[in-house]
């Protein structure tokens, strides 16, 4: 792909940046959501966040806008043997996405951690406003790996995930159409920073870049004939 | 040493941000769309085919070679001097021109997937079955198009063979079923070389299977109806350096002079556009979609449409021109027009409102399903129904199987033509 | 015939195309490659700081065609309030106004006769801003939000005004030196994208930062 060539051309700049940037460690540990950190079994955390998504122009056109953010409620719970159970509920009223999965944490040392996991999601949407009468539902799978570094009070996590559509069904009026099952939908990568915010809360800030054929929050917009789109997204959350 | 360690450390959060932003720097949704062209002059040596010859080899073909790329069957149909082959796979199509040389028919052109940048040169020759097509002897059963296809501007080398199976059912060619292109669908995912809602795209859209055109009408500050889809003059449709903002705030002189659409065209007036459609195309159905801001100009739009109909009649042109009433506000404003019952209209609202304004065409949204009972009732009154905007392949198939619409609005006329003529 | 946009736009597409944008990105990257991550040594744990800035802005967008009188230069001003905990990431919001471009072309020959063309484009923006201070007195800011672009146009004797909204994205680096315990004076180099009409702006401004609340 063209973008891979462009990335390779920028690689020398990346290496220079790494080599010339000094580092100083920070202080206390941060209560994180995305960072691959082990948790005591059955210890749990909750978080609430919002996402802002930039959709490609050629499918957004210039449209009647309903400006709702995507709201995410997430929870993680520690399990034995360095496993974590995680769940997310994402909603923007017309779209609802329920995710459940698990990841296994490996700590190289007290600062450098990694995880690998898989999430399964059920998503349904219902658009009955503005003369639409469309429903959609389906199942997704998201395998992921992550690498994170703990600077003390700040953690940085790089996560890469694949997206598979296991099944997808659209109902327009009384007409149902099913898309091809178990198809590769693309991938997304994310860098997130998490640090203490106020008293016992933690703020997380993430930039995610998705390369997908269908991105569930914007399902009414996606054209019937699919292609991959780059979709940037900013995520902010508070871990309580 | 400490300083060196710090220098060499890769563990700095700022670096990660730089990395991700730089990694994302290569991410663009723009497709590098090219339009390959032949330059070997082969067709200059050929003689054009007559209409009878062209009609003889229209039909449904099996793809004996090349089915991975183009599907298992295709529809072959002439549109003027262009031969269109609708493949149905990835909204793919061929667009060819051709002629005969001695007893062989040669075709050259391009193939393309309508939804992405994949395209290439292609060429065919017909020797088997050429005698029949050229009117000499034989029958259609032996017709075979043997050709090659390639990627981009490269010389085509991959084989593709199409074998004639049957002609297109005659009733499909004579019935009035309207494949209506959604404002020309030149922009957005379709990547044609002409901008939507222009005279330029109206002149060429029939090659892509359309026999109807839905166009978006607004009214300028000085009351002139013009064609433009979006609510603002924005980078999706206009070149940087043009006027910006809401088009209705400008006079038509300003729009026509200081706006260049993305492919360089000027914004046309409805009057000029209809004149070109009537005199320079064979389009059969025009759907004049009045945007909500067109309310002050409804009478003018109606008069322009009527003038175009009269011109078409004087030229014996078979074309239906309707103005579409799309919102309740437009509906109420339309009721205030003198003699509104005799103005040919499309009603996108309920069948009751359609009756009120005596519309000939009902146009419901595709999300409401086939609505066969409502459509049948309209048919019994001599009216027709056009559904919009149908872009999902499985939905197109289902609507043909289960529905009784008289036409469909679509961004993918090649795909709709494949399903329609392939029945 | 209309589709639906569910969420607000966040256009990091400033990083997606053209050479000028890559150059800006590279410059910002180079400005912070000598940074180190330090906890902000503050006398208090949290504070609220207001920034008031103004300066010069230039539109660096590529125009498909441009009149000789196209003026890409202008002024901008903004007001920002930042929440500053004793950690790396700060958050706040910013309101600002910026010139985008203007032109004043005389005696244009057209099919409809001769006319002058006068266009003035400016934008008001409101953004959420996230900030980091990689080393003392130095800040890197990232903003995302909304901008309302207004165009005033006069041609063929017609005056028109139109205002429309779209996404806005900002990235900036700033250096502030303390004037007093609560007051800092500094400057910022900013890049901004206003998505509605695809405008990219680069600006240099002077800012005052006043810490008005701390605890």
Image (tube, grey):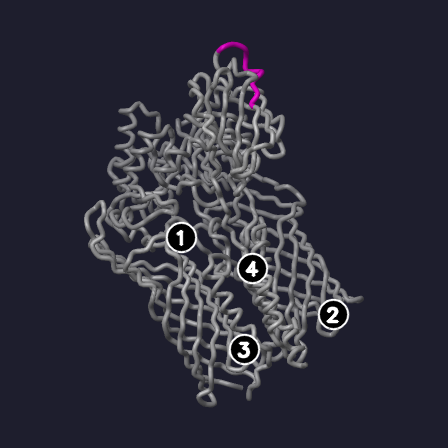
Marks 1 and 4 belong to one chain? yes
Q: Which structural element holds mark 2?
A: loop
Marks 3 and 2 belong to one chain? no
Which residue lies under the disc numbered 2? A38
Residue that protrudes farthest toward the front in the picture:
B40
| Res C68 → quadrant | bottom left
Provide the chain ID for the residue under circle 1. B
Q: Residues within 10 Å of mark 2 (few under 14, many from 20)?
A: many
Which residue lies under the disc numbered 3? C133
Q: Position of residue A122 (x, y in %)?
A: 65, 52
- Of badges 1 and 4, the one in the foreground is 4
Q: Residue B24 carries which label?
A: 4
The reply to whether residue B394 is visible in this rendering is no
Q: In this view, does A29 lie to the left or right of B330?
A: right
- Of badges 2 and 4, the one in the foreground is 4
Q: How far apart are marks 1 and 3 (CA)?
A: 36 Å
Q: Which structural element holds mark 3?
A: loop
Which residue lies under the disc numbered 1? B235
Which quarter of the image is occupied by the C terminus of chain A? Answer: bottom right
Provide the residue span drawn in magenta: B136-145
Q: In this orientation, which residue lies closer to the viewer: A217 or C101? A: C101
Q: Residue A156 carries which label?
A: none
Q: Residue at x 50, y 69 (%)?
A: C28
Provide the chain ID for the residue under circle 3. C
Mark 2 and 4 residues: CB-CB less than 8 Å, in contact?
A: no
Q: Is residue B278 magenta?
A: no
Marks 2 and 4 belong to one chain? no
A130 shown above or below B119:
below
């Amino acid at each position: 792909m063209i973008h891979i060539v462009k990335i390779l051309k920028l690689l020398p700049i990346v290496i220079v940046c790494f080599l010339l940037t000094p580092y100083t460690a920070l202080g206390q540990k941060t209560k994180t959501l995305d960072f691959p950190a082990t948790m005591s079994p059955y210890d749990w955390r909750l978080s609430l966040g919002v996402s802002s998504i930039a959709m490609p122009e050629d499918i957004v056109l210039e449209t009647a806008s309903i400006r709702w953010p995507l709201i995410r409620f997430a929870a993680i719970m520690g399990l034995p043997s360095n496993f974590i159970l995680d769940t997310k509920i994402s909603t923007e009223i017309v779209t609802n996405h329920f995710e459940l999965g698990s990841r296994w944490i490996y700590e190289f040392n007290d600062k450098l951690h990694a995880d690998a996991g898989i999430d399964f999601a059920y998503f349904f949407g219902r658009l009955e406003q503005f003369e639409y009468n469309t429903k959609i539902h389906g199942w997704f799978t998201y395998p992921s790996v992550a690498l994170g570094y703990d600077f003390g009070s700040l953690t940085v996590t790089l996560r890469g995930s694949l997206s598979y559509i296991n099944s997808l069904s659209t109902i327009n009026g009384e007409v149902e159409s099913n898309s091809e099952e178990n198809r590769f939908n693309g991938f997304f990568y994310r860098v997130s920073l998490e640090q203490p915010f106020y008293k016992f809360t933690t703020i997380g800030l993430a930039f995610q870049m998705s390369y997908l054929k269908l991105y569930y929050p914007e399902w009414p917009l996606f054209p019937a004939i699919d292609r991959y789109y780059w979709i940037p997204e900013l995520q902010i959350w508070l871990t309580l | 040493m400490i300083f060196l360690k710090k220098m060499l450390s890769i563990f700095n959060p700022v670096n990660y941000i730089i990395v991700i932003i730089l990694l994302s720097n290569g991410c663009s949704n723009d497709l590098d769309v090219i339009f390959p062209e032949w330059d070997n002059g082969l067709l200059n040596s050929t003689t054009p085919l007559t209409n009878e010859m062209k009609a003889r080899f229209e039909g449904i073909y099996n793809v004996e070679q090349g089915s991975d790329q183009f599907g298992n069957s295709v529809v072959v149909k002439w549109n003027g001097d262009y031969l269109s082959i609708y493949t149905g796979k990835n909204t793919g199509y061929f667009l060819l021109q051709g002629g005969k040389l001695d007893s062989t028919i040669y075709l050259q052109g391009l193939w393309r997937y309508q939804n992405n940048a994949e395209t290439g040169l292609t060429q065919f020759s017909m020797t088997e079955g050429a005698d029949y097509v050229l009117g000499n002897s034989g029958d259609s059963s032996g017709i075979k198009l043997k050709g090659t296809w390639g990627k981009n501007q490269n010389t085509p080398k991959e084989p593709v063979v199409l074998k004639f199976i049957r002609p297109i059912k005659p009733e499909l060619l004579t019935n009035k079923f309207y494949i209506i292109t959604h404002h020309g669908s030149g922009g957005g995912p379709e990547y044609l070389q002409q901008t939507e809602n222009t005279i330029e795209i109206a002149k060429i859209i029939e090659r892509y299977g359309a026999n109807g055109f839905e166009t978006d009408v607004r009214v300028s500050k000085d009351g002139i109806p013009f064609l433009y889809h979006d609510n603002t003059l924005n980078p999706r449709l206009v070149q940087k350096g043009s006027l910006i903002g809401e088009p209705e705030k400008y006079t038509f002189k300003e729009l026509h002079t200081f706006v260049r659409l993305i492919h360089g065209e000027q914004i046309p007036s409805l009057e000029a556009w209809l004149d070109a459609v009537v005199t320079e195309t064979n389009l059969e159905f025009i759907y004049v979609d009045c945007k909500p801001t067109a309310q002050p100009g409804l009478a003018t739009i109606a008069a322009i449409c009527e003038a175009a109909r009269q011109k078409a009649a004087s030229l014996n042109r078979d074309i239906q021109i309707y103005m579409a009433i799309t919102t309740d506000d437009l509906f109420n404003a339309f009721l205030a027009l003198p003699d509104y019952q005799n103005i040919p209209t499309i009603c996108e609202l309920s069948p009751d409102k359609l009756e009120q304004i005596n519309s000939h065409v009902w146009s419901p949204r595709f999300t409401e399903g086939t609505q066969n009972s409502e459509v049948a009732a309209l048919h019994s009154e001599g009216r027709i129904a056009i559904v919009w905007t149908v872009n999902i392949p499985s939905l197109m198939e289902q609507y043909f199987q289960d529905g009784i619409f008289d036409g469909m609005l679509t961004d993918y006329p090649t795909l709709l033509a494949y399903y329609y003529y392939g029945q | 015939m209309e589709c639906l946009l569910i969420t607000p736009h966040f256009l990091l597409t400033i990083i997606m195309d053209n050479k000028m944008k890559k150059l800006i990105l590279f410059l910002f990257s180079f400005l912070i490659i000598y940074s180190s991550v330090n906890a902000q040594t503050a006398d208090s744990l949290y504070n609220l700081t207001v920034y008031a800035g103004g300066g010069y802005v230039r539109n660096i967008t590529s125009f498909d065609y441009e009149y000789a009188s196209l003026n890409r230069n202008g002024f901008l001003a903004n007001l920002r309030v930042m929440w500053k905990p004793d950690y790396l990431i700060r958050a706040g919001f910013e309101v600002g106004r910026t010139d985008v471009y203007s032109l004043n072309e005389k005696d244009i020959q057209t099919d409809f006769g001769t006319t002058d063309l006068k266009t003035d484009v400016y934008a008001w923006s409101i953004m959420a801003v996230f900030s980091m201070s990689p080393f003392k007195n130095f800040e890197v800011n990232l903003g995302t939000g909304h901008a309302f672009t207004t165009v005033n146009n006069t041609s063929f004797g017609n005056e028109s005004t139109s205002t429309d909204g779209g996404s806005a994205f900002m990235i900036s680096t700033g250096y502030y030196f303390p004037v007093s315990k609560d007051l800092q004076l500094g400057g910022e180099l900013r890049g901004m994208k206003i998505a509605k009409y695809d405008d990219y702006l680069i600006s240099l401004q002077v800012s005052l930062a006043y810490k008005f609340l701390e605890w």
